[in-house]
Amino acid sequence: MSASTIDTQPRIVAEQAALPLCVDLDGTLIHSDMLHEGLCALVTDPRSLQILPQLFRGRAAFKEAVAARVPVEPELLPFNETLLAYLRAQKKAGRYLVLATAADRSVACAVAECVGLFDEVIASDGTDNLKGAAKARALVARFGPRGFCYAGNAHSDLAVWREAAAAIVVNAPSGVLARARSQGPVELTIDNRPAVFRELLKAARPHQWIKNVLVFVPILTAHALHDVSAWIAAALMFAAFCCTASGIYLINDMLDIRADRLHPRKRMRPFARGAIALPLGALAALALICAGVVLSQLVHVAWIIVLYALMSISYSLRLKELPLVDVFMLAALYTIRVFGGGEATHHRLSLWLLGFSSFLFLSLALLKRTAEMMSVAKSGNTKAARRGYDASDMPILQLFGIAAAFAASIVMALFVQSEANAEHYASPSVLWLTVPLLLFWACRMWMAGSRGNMHHDPIIYAARDRVSWVIGIAVVIVLVAAKSLIYLPK
């Protein structure tokens, strides 16, 4: 993030300081765009299609309709603190401040009231869309040619700067900044944008890719470690799931902006902070999902990635708000990774593996939701945004989750008991040691969750937990011992 810079010509600043300072909202006063955020919020509202006819009445009418259905919460917005500090200093010096924006007037007035610095609001009113030349005409009509200074950020603001006495350029592309300087004095430049690629990578959550190693499980359970083609196919599916999942994470975060801003930890996510423009996020999400489909088609199972994407998007749009449906869907999203690996490698899932993984992933999904509700309760709230639970549901969720963990252990015990395993192991009775190891791990995970230590997704928590690694190594040792030539009674 680069430091903000102030024009080094104090004479220019002194000459313009007596003039009103008009400030744009989207991308200038805040790091986001109110219309884009409103549209993202409407995607999850089944009544959103009702506003589409407003498009035929013009952009201003459409903004008014969106604003009417998505009440603004200005206290949650990602304000540009550098610009706000400058505005406070100007207000203290007695300067007249105006919020001049193409956003709907209801939105602008709510933001102005929250900030408490602006003397006047000039905004779109449902008839006139005050953007670019239209805003320039409105400001000239109000203050006269060269009778105001203007803070903006986009190419459309060049039309306003041509009529202004001086410009304040906030996080503008280099070409826009150069043209603004060529048109007249620049009172202030602010550039506190984070690196977009870095923020996109953060929003894609590469640390979550560890979940996709589940595609390799069918190779291990089929005892096909020597099958090179299966490893290649699984690697392609791993990459396909990584791309698709990252695209879904981008979509999920764009739809959950408000909920994330209310969350003590998730409020620092890139979209919640306004670090990534929402149209750019949508394009990146589409590109990643398409890449996942292409990669999976190389092993002729693109339909699995398409199904996974549809399930994930349905979860983000609506299913995550339905109690119990959400955790069963989360469990299914884990299980489909194992299923996809089996289909791609042609080492398909046995009913034992399907049953075990279904119960285990349901337990982990319930653990994730319980930990989330505990975090909400600690913050003093009783209900999480876009969730179908409240704090009183935690005991029953814990009961469901622990029961699912024990069910997974029972399936593992029955699998070990199956005589079909004898042909794969020299000492199959050794496999019984995996049952207490698994049960101990599951009980420990739930203990960590009940103590409020489950700050991440359970699988991510396990990947960072030393004890989980020790248990995993112990399971590997047991499997190696069971396949060895040491004789034990069967």
Image: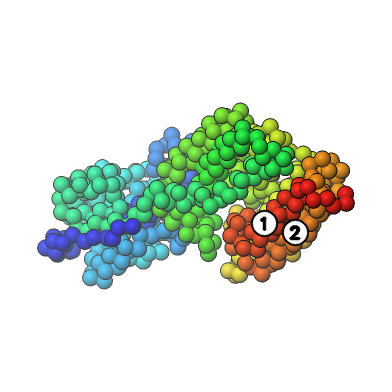
- Across and down, in percent, residue 243 comes to 52, 41
The residue located at (53%, 64%) in the rendering is: 264
- Across and down, in percent, residue 336 comes to 67, 41
Looking at the rendered structure, the secondary structure element under dot 1 is: helix
Asked if residue 383 shows in the view, the reply is no
For residue 348, which quarter of the picture?
top right
The residue to which callout 2 is attached is 437
> Is residue 352 left or right of 388 when viewed as pictured?
right
- How many marks overall? 2
The residue located at (31%, 66%) in the rendering is: 85
Front-lying residue, 162 or 461: 461
> Is residue 251 left or right of 28 when viewed as pictured?
right
The residue located at (18%, 59%) in the rendering is: 7
The residue located at (75%, 44%) in the rendering is: 353
- Across and down, in percent, residue 142 comes to 23, 53
The residue to which callout 1 is attached is 473
Q: Determine the CA span between mark 1 and mark 2.
A: 11 Å
Q: Closer to the N terminus: mark 1 or mark 2?
A: 2
Which residue is situated farthest in the left direction here? 11
From the image, state whether disc 1 or disc 2 is nearer to you.
1
Disc 1 marks a residue whose amino acid type is: Ile
Disc 2 marks a residue whose amino acid type is: Leu
Asked if labels 2 and 1 touch by Cβ distance under 8 angstroms, the answer is no
For residue 438, which quarter of the picture?
bottom right
Q: In this view, does 299 lie above or below 192?
A: above
Please state, as top left, top right, bottom left or bottom right, where the N terminus lies in the image.
Answer: bottom left
- Across and down, in percent, residue 101 comes to 33, 51
Asked if residue 288 shows in the view, the reply is yes
> Is residue 365 left or right of 153 when viewed as pictured?
right
